[in-house]
Amino acid sequence: MYISLSDRSGGKRGKSPSEQTALSKVPFRLSPVIVWLGIVSMVTDISSESVTAILPLYVTGFLGLSTIAFGFIDGINQGASAIVRIAAGWASDRSGHPKRIALAGYGLSMLARIGFLFAGGFWAVAAIVTGDRIGKGIRTAPRDALITVSAQPEHLARSFGMHRMLDNIGAAAGPLIAFLILLVIPNGFSTVFVVSLAFAVIGVAVLGLVVPDLRARSAKDAPKGQRLLAFSWRHFKEPGLGKLLVAAGLLGLVTIGDGFIYLVLQDRDSFAVQWFPLLFVGTNVAFLVMAVPLGRLADRLGRVPVFIAGHVALLACYFLAAAPLGGLWATLTCLLLLGAFYAATDGVLAALASQLTPEGKLATGIAAAQTVVALSRMAASAGFGVLWYAVGASAAVTIAGILLACVVVAVIFILPGARPGRAGA
């Protein structure tokens, strides 16, 4: 199955208003491939998020390490995948078989889960998290290329939203499972790691046995002069894509890791540690509820405005977390805003990148955007850990919020379609 650049535009590039209206009325049909990929992501996220939900407590509480150490590990969690994202995307485009590359990534993350059963110190945890995130970096762009190939072009962001909804059912279930384990078995971190490994095995099995090996248009099939036979940064200098990479990188530099937000909320409200994983549950429930509606909104009104609005929600989350307003409702509102941020940006960014990437380079273009985000967030996490150590939790979040506000204003001028009166991408 092949897909062309014009097919991926979703009716947003070079279409008249009447043509866009006609495309918007095309009935939405969800491909079974996207459903199966969603199930794979769901069980894999149960595996990964059950560990992520306990990692801040495991590192700072059980292992007794500092927030600087956690910032370093969280930075790896955010950005280690960047090491291989573009190479994996290029390999997917070069071969035309994205499933095979995705399967290798899921398999590596599964093997990394075994390491958690034996880890007992900073360097061991850092190495295991690195392996797991490299696996994520390998699988993400090829998986999203499979989604793009399988989706209706005029409903691309909505299709990504459906996948992200299934993905985040797992992302909500993983922390809930971790919470129940810690509730029954205090300090039962090793039990969480065993359960995580079991779900990782299931995810690899479903992908390998059930998901078809759809063939995307490969670099070999592209017209002569456009072939991606060797890796080069010039492949990312496409009109529009470069601006998206700059904007995504700037925003990533002022995006705090979720674990830090949750530690700030716990520091402010002093709730019992066994409730900590439920913060991840709240965010991911909000994400899965809003993923499809916001994806649909992005397809109809423009993907760039929705992407910007997601970061405005993140900005509101920062300032609410920094405010001296403790209590259940303030915490729940923070989780709702954080979920809205992910619902408005995660799948929408992938849809934007695929829209702006020429044929034969689909997975590579998606990987480029994801790499920029991963690297910038890795730097943000490491820097925020030091900032917290220097000025305290509330002041650090306030500074991050001020910087994010400045970047959002700058991005409005960088991305076409972000300002009123401009055609949305």
Image (cartoon, rainbow, N blue to C red):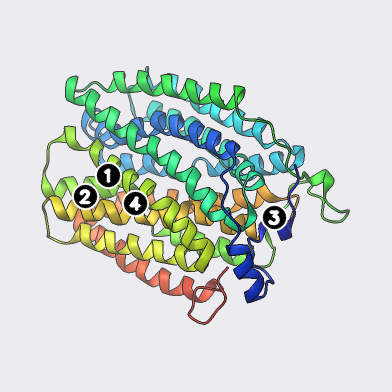
- Count of marks placed on residues: 4
Local SS, label 1: helix
Q: Which amino acid type corresponds to the residue marked 4 in the rendered image? A: Gly
Please name the residue that numbered disc 2 is placed on. Answer: 264
In the depicted structure, whether residue 187 falls above or below residue 351:
above
- Which mark sits nearer the N-terminus, 2 or 4? 2
Report if the CB atoms under discs 1 and 3 are less than 8 Å apart: no
Please name the residue that numbered disc 1 is placed on. Answer: 282
Local SS, label 3: helix
Q: Quadrant of the C terminus?
A: bottom right
Q: Residues within 10 Å of mark 2 (few under 14, many from 20)?
A: many
Which residue is pictured at 42% across the width and 74% down the height? Answer: 409
Residue 151: percent from left, percent from top: 62, 48
Q: Which amino acid type corresponds to the residue marked 2 in the rendered image? A: Val
Which residue is pictured at 54% across the width and 24% down the height? Answer: 206
Marks 4/1: CA–CA distance: 8 Å
Which residue is pictured at 35% across the width and 22% down the height? Answer: 193
- Which mark sits nearer the N-terminus, 1 or 3? 3
Report if the CB atoms under discs 4 and 1 are less than 8 Å apart: yes
Report if the CB atoms under discs 2 and 3 are less than 8 Å apart: no
